[in-house]
Amino acid sequence: MTAKRAPKPAVRKATAKARANKAVRGRKKALVVRIPKVDRWNLRLYVAGQTARSIAAFSNLKRLCEDRLAGRYTIEVIDLLKQPQLAQGDQIIAIPTLIRRLPEPMKRVVGDLSNLERVLVGMDLQEGAAR
């Protein structure tokens, strides 16, 4: 006695138009810029003296804020050589470190902020592929 196999379900192939629409939807999501509705952004940059990395971090941050936040931000620069006790409050273990205090939740990015995409994703200024 031979057992009969159940017929395979029909597999629907995606049409070329459906694949193209799906690709376009994926691209649109990558281009969306989402900036939380906040009157003021409160940013704190921890540095150690006037080193090249500290100066680069401040310059990159200033340029980013002018481009994306247009006057809706405050930057507080804290030099840990002058005020080392302030590092403990925000748990700073590397410098330069950028802390976004407002809007909540608090976010942080470590480094000289030269990688724009990483900073945008880290500060929640843009949706990125890393999410």
Image: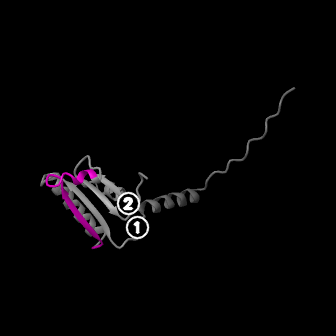
**Quadrant hosting residue 128:** bottom left
Q: Is residue 46 magenta?
A: no
Numbered mark located on residue 124 in the image = 2
Numbered mark located on residue 14 in the image = none
Task: Report x, y in % for residue 23.
Answer: 50, 57
- Bounds of the magenta span? 71-88
Residue at x-position 60% and y-position 56%:
15
The N terminus is located in which quarter? top right
85 or 108: nearer the eye? 85
Query: Which residue is at the far front?
Result: 85
Query: Which residue is at the far right?
Result: 1
Q: Is residue 87 magenta?
A: yes
Alpha-carbon distance for marks 2 and 1?
8 Å
Asked if one can make out residue 56 in the rendered structure from this viewpoint, the answer is yes
Specify the amino acid type for callout 2: Asp
Residue at x-position 38% and y-position 60%:
124
Q: Which residue is mark 1?
A: 36
Task: Report x, y in % for residue 6.
Answer: 79, 38
Task: Report x, y in % for residue 2.
Answer: 84, 28
